Image (cartoon, coloured by chain):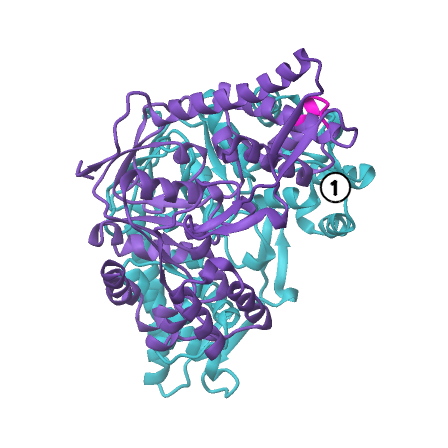
Chain colours: A cyan, B purple
C-alpha cells in the first residue's frame, strides 16, 4: 500500500469543484458580453487571438509555441461571420450545459448534439475547428469544458486517487490494484491525487514495455508511476502528466522508440504542439527524454533498421523546428542522420527480457539525476 | 459493492495454474517428439494442419471458420524446411521459458528475443507467421503461451476479480472502482472471476459511448459489465468476452456503428476470423448484435452519411461471407445496400446525450430477451 509520504496540497474546496466554478464563470462572462452588446443595440461580437500560422511563435522561456498579438473579431454584424459566431455561441452554451450537469462529451458527440438544436456543422472537422476557437476564447483546454477525445492510454503505480465525477465522487481508487493499468479518461483526468510514495513518473510509448515494467515491478524498484502513452499521448494524458509534475513535484522521464516519431512523442509531452499554441496546461517543460536515443543504438549495439525516406524527411523537419534547438536534442537528430538507423524499445530484448529494466533504466535514471 | 449472487465455479487448483500446467505439458510433448526422432535416428519433423485458403472452411454448427483435414509436414530432413523447422522449435522453447517464468511477451518482443539466440527471422511478419504455426501445432492461442499483442481495450462493471500473474497473485480488484475502465492486458485476461451481480455483458465499439454508459450508470441500471472494444477488439478482449459468457453464463450484447465495419466487429466477436480458424477460444457464438443496425437508421431517423464506394465494396464482400447467411444479418446487409446510408452510435446524441441509454438500449435489450 502507498504511504502518505507525499500528498497533494489540501484545499478547502476540491480541485474539481474549483475548476467547475471557474469554467462556469468564464462561460457566463462570455454569454454576458453577448447580452450586453444586444442591450446596447450593438451587433454582438467576440474577439480572440488569431490561430493563423503567422501568429504561432515559439516561446523559449515557456518552451512551447504560443499565440502572438494578432486577434480576429467574429461579429454578428458581418454576414460572413454570422454562421461561425452562432456556432461558437452555441458551443459555449452546450459546454456550459455539460459542466452544469457534470457530464462529459466527445468531439463526435458535440457534432451530433448540435443537430438537436438545429445548429448546422457541415462535418466534424468544422465543429472541431470551432471548439478550438472556444478554447482560445476561454484560454482553456476543452477537457476543462468536459469535451474529451476518443483515445485513451493507461496508468499504474503506487498512488491512491479520489474520483470527482458524478456518481463516483469521493470514491478512492488504488492505482496499483490493476497491473494492466487503469484507462486515462475523463474520470481519471479530473481525479484528485491523494497519497503516493512515488518519486518519478515514467511515460512509456508502448503497451508491451509498459507490461514489462509492471511485471518487473518497476513501480516498486524505482518508486515510479507508469504511464502507457499508447503512441502519441492523447491530450488528456499530457494534461495528467503535467498535473503529476506540477501538483506532486514529481520528475517525469519519457521512454520511446529511437526514431523521429518516438523523439517527437517525447517532445510533445515536454513542449506541446503548434496546434495547442493557445494552451498552457498540456506541456511539461521539466520532463526529460530518457531514450531510446539515436546514440543508444550504437552504445548498446541494438538491432536496428535502415531509416526510410519518410523518416529522413521527418528528421529534417524536426531539425528546422524551434523546439529542437537545445544541444542534446539537436545532436541526437544529427546522430540519426549520420548513421541512418532506427531502433525500438523492444530491441533490448536481444539481451533478455529484463535487460531494459535491470541495466538500461538505472543508467538512464542516473544520468537524469546528475543532469 | 457487488453481491455474491453469481460466482465462478470454484476449482481445487486455480484456472491459471491449471492452464500453466496444460501448456507446459503440451510444449514438453512437442520437445519430446523431437528428441524421440533424434534418438531413433530419424530427421525430426512436425506435422500440423494446413492454413492455406483451401483448407479454411466454415463450420455452421460451431458458427466459425475451422481448418480442414489437409496437413503439412515440416521436416528437418528437407533442406527447404530446416529454417522454419528450427524457428518453430525455438519458438516452442521460448514459449516454454515464458510460461515457466510466468512472464509475458509481445509479438515484437519475440522477434527481437530470437536474436539473443542467433535464431534468424527476416522481419516480424516472419516470426508472427511461425507463432501462428505454433498455435496450430498446440491447438491453442498464443495468449495461452503468454504472447500478447500491443492493443488494449477496457472493462468496467460490478465484478471482483482475482489476479494470477506473478507478483499480483491473489490480489483482488473491484472492476467498478475506476469509471474510465481497467485495461484488458495479460493480467486481466488471466484473472479469475470472483463475484458479480451482472446479468449481461455489453461490448461497445467506442470509448465515447463507453464513457456515456458509465456516466449514465448502465452497469447498475441494467446490471451490465461494460467492455470498450476500442474498434475491432484485440484477441485477448475476445477471449475475455468468451470467458465471461462461458464461465459466468452471461449473455453478451454488442453495440457498434451502423456501417459494414461496425457490423463486422460484432461478427468477429461472435464467429471469429478466418485467420484464427485453428482456434476455438476466441469466439462467442451466443453473443448478439444489438445495433446500430442499418434498419435503425430509418427507424430512429438518425443523422447519416452516404456510404462510400469502399463501404459498398465491403458490403458485397460480407454478403458473400458464410458467416452472414443468417437471415437477420443478411437482411441488414440488404438494408445498407438499399438506402446506401451509414450512421454512428454518437448519432443518437441528436436526441440528447442520454437518449441512447434511456430509450434505445432498453428497446434492444427487450428484443434480445424475447428472441
B231 within the magenta span:
no
Considering the image in quadrants, where does the C terminus of chain A appear?
Answer: top right
Work out whether residue A178 or residue A196 is closer to the camera in this orientation and state it: A178
Q: Residue B257's image quarter?
A: bottom left
- Chain of the residue where label 1 is placed in the rendered structure: A
Residue A132 percent coordinates (x, y): 49, 65
Question: Depth check: B91 or A168 in front?
Answer: B91
The location of residue A219, given as percent across then percent down, is 45, 26
In this view, A348 is above or below A146: above
Seen as rendered, the residue at the extreme right is A338
Q: Residue at x 75, y 24 (%)?
A: B77
Q: Position of residue B134 (x, y in %)?
A: 58, 32
Q: Is residue A61 visible?
A: no
Quarter of the figure with the N terminus of chain A? top left
Q: Which residues are magenta?
A: B113-120
Q: Is residue B19 above or below residue B355?
A: above
Kindly state the secondary structure of the residue where label 1 is placed: helix
Reply above or below: B228 against A114: above
According to the picture, the residue beneath numbered tag 1 turns out to be A333
Residue visible at 52% across and 60% down?
B321
Amino acid at each position: 500500500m502507498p504511504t502518505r509520504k507525499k500528498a497533494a496540497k489540501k484545499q478547502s474546496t476540491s480541485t474539481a469543484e474549483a475548476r467547475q466554478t471557474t469554467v462556469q464563470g468564464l462561460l457566463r462572462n462570455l454569454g454576458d458580453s453577448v447580452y450586453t452588446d444586444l442591450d446596447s443595440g450593438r451587433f454582438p461580437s467576440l474577439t480572440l487571438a488569431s490561430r493563423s500560422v503567422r501568429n504561432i511563435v515559439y516561446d523559449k522561456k515557456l518552451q512551447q509555441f504560443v499565440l502572438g498579438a494578432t486577434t480576429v473579431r467574429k461579429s454578428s454584424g458581418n454576414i460572413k461571420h454570422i454562421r461561425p459566431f452562432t456556432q461558437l455561441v452555441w458551443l459555449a452554451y452546450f459546454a456550459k450545459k455539460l459542466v452544469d450537469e457534470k457530464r462529459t462529451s466527445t468531439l463526435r458527440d458535440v457534432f451530433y448534439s448540435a443537430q438537436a438544436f438545429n445548429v448546422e456543422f457541415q462535418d466534424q472537422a468544422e465543429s472541431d475547428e470551432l471548439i478550438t476557437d472556444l478554447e482560445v476564447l476561454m484560454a482553456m483546454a476543452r477537457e476543462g469544458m468536459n469535451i474529451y477525445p476518443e483515445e485513451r492510454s493507461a496508468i499504474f503505480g503506487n498512488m491512491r486517487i479520489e474520483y470527482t465525477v458524478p456518481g463516483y465522487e469521493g470514491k478512492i481508487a488504488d492505482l496499483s490494484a490493476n497491473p494492466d493499468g487503469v484507462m486515462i479518461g475523463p474520470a481519471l483526468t479530473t481525479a484528485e491525487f491523494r497519497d503516493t510514495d512515488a518519486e518519478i513518473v515514467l511515460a512509456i510509448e508502448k503497451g508491451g514495455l509498459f507490461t514489462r515494467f509492471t511485471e518487473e515491478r518497476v513501480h516498486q524498484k524505482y518508486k515510479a508511476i507508469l504511464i502507457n502513452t499508447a503512441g502519441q499521448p492523447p491530450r488528456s494524458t499530457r494534461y495528467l502528466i503535467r498535473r503529476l509534475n506540477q501538483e506532486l513535484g514529481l520528475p517525469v522521464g519519457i521512454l520511446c522508440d529511437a526514431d523521429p516519431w518516438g523523439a517527437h512523442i517525447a517532445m510533445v509531452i515536454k513542449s506541446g504542439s503548434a496546434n495547442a499554441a493557445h494552451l498552457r496546461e498540456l506541456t511539461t517543460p521539466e520532463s526529460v527524454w530518457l531514450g531510446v536515443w539515436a546514440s543508444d543504438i550504437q552504445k548498446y549495439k541494438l538491432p536496428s533498421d535502415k531509416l526510410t525516406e519518410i523518416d529522413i524527411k521527418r528528421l529534417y523537419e524536426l531539425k528546422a523546428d524551434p523546439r529542437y534547438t537545445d544541444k542534446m536534442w539537436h545532436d541526437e537528430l544529427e546522430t540519426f542522420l549520420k548513421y541512418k538507423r532506427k531502433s525500438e524499445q523492444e530491441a533490448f530484448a536481444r539481451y533478455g527480457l529484463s535487460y531494459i529494466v535491470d541495466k538500461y533504466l538505472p543508467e538512464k535514471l542516473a544520468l537524469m539525476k546528475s543532469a
